[in-house]
Image (spheres, rainbow, N blue to C red):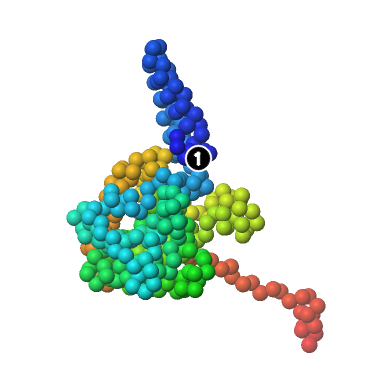
Amino acid sequence: MKHQLDFEKPIAELQNKLDELRKHSEVDLREEITRMEKKLDETRRQIYLNLNAWQRVQLARHPRRPFTLDYLHSAFSEFHELHGDRLFADDKAIVGGFARLGDQQVMVIGTQKGRDTKENIKRNFGSAHPEGYRKALRLMKMADKFGLPIITLIDTAGAYPGIGAEERHIAEAIAVNLREMMLFQVPIIALVIGEGGSGGALGIGVADRVLILENAYYSVISPEGCAAILWKDRAAAPKAAEALKITAKHLLELRLADEVVPEPLGGAHNDMPATAHAIREVVLRNLEHLQKLSITERLQQRYAKYRAHGHFIEKPVIAEEPPKAKVQAVAAK
C-alpha cells in the first residue's frame, strides 16, 4: 500500500502475504489464497468501520485523497475556470467557475491543495489569501446575478495566517463573505471533501445545505492547534480530535452538517469514481429540494439554520446565604 497510515499496517501486511502466495503458480494454493482473501476483507472491514476521530482526520489528509479539481472533472462536467478578484491577484488556493452538474448549470468554487511540493507552493497548501475569498465572492455575486446555484467544495486547514494576508485584511474578507452568503437569493450547497479548518473553511461555507464526506472533518481549530493550547503538547492531537467532535458523525448529531456522503471502504482515494458518483447524486437531490422553495422561504430557512447553531446553557445564579452573624445583627435591629 502506498502512503499507508499507521492503523493500516495490518492490512498492508496481509496484502503482502497474499501477493506472495499468488506468485507461486507452480503450487496449488487456491484454498490458502481464498482463506487469506477472506481474512484480508474481514480485517479491512473491522479497521475501517471502527475508525476513531484522529484516524478519520488522517484519512481526510491522505496525500492520495481526491481534491477539488479531481471532482470538478469527475462529478461535474464542462468546467470553465474563472480567475482573479479584480482587486489584487489570482489566488490559486481557490478555484472556481461555471460547470454543469447533471443537467444543471452551476457556479462551483473550492479550495485546492497540491500533490507535490511544487504544486503545494503554487496552491499555498490550500490556504487562501484575502484575494482568494474576494475571488470567490466575485464569482458568487455573478452566480446570484444570473440565477445559478452555488456549490462550494471545502478542503483547507485554514486561511493563510501570514503577514501579507493580514496586511490585505484576511479577517475582513472572510467576514464579508459570511455576510453576503447569508443574503444571496440562489440555492447554496457547501460540501466538505477533506479538511474543514476554521474561518478558512467558513469563508465559503455559509449555505442552505452543509454536506460532508464520511471521512472528512469540520472544526474551529485543528486537533494539533487545540492540543497545543489545552495540553501544551501537539502530541495530544488524538485526544483533542475526540474532544472537538469534528467527525461527520458528530457533526450530523450536532446538526452542524445536514447529510453525510458515504465513501468507499478505506476512503475516497480507494475508489474516486464511486465517490464522485455519490457526490453528484447527493448534491443534485439537495439542489432539487432547495429549488422547490421560494426565495423568501429559502432565506428564512438559511437564517434559522445558523441562528440555531451554538446553543448553550447557563446555570441559574443562586444567591449565597448571608453569614450567620450578619443575620443575627439584622434581627437585633
- Secondary structure, mark 1, is loop
* Residue 239 picture location, percent across and down: 58, 50
* Residue 120 picture location, percent across and down: 44, 54
Q: Residue furthest top?
A: 27
Which quadrant of the structure image shows residue 142?
bottom left
Pick the residue in front: 161 or 265. Answer: 161
Vertical order, 208 against 267 (above or below): below
Please give the name of the residue rendered at 33% of the width and 73% of the height, measured from the top-left corner: 86
Instruction: Give, as a three-letter code, the residue at label 1.
Output: Leu
Quarter of the rendering occupied by the N terminus: top left
Q: Is residue 270 left or right of residue 46?
A: left
Q: Is residue 184 left or right of residue 32?
A: left
Please give the name of the residue rendered at 49% of the width and 49% of the height, measured from the top-left corner: 57
Please give the name of the residue rendered at 42% of the width and 53% of the height, measured from the top-left corner: 119
* Residue 175 picture location, percent across and down: 43, 72
Q: What residue is disc 1 on?
A: 5
Q: Residue furthest bottom?
A: 333
Pick the residue in front: 310 or 64. Answer: 64
Which quadrant of the structure image shows residue 266?
top left
Vertical order, 23 against 52 (above or below): above
The tally of labels here is 1
Pick the residue in front: 30 or 159. Answer: 159
Is residue 256 something that shows in the picture?
A: no
Number of other residues with Cα within 10 Å of mark 1, as a class: few under 14, some 14 to 19, many 20 or more: few
Quarter of the rendering occupied by the C terminus: bottom right
Please give the name of the residue rendered at 38% of the width and 40% of the height, measured from the top-left corner: 270
Vertical order, 45 against 212 (above or below): above
Vertical order, 274 against 19 (above or below): below
Q: Residue furthest left?
A: 103
Is residue 265 something that shows in the picture?
A: yes
Q: Is residue 181 left or right of residue 227?
A: left
Pick the residue in front: 252 or 190. Answer: 190
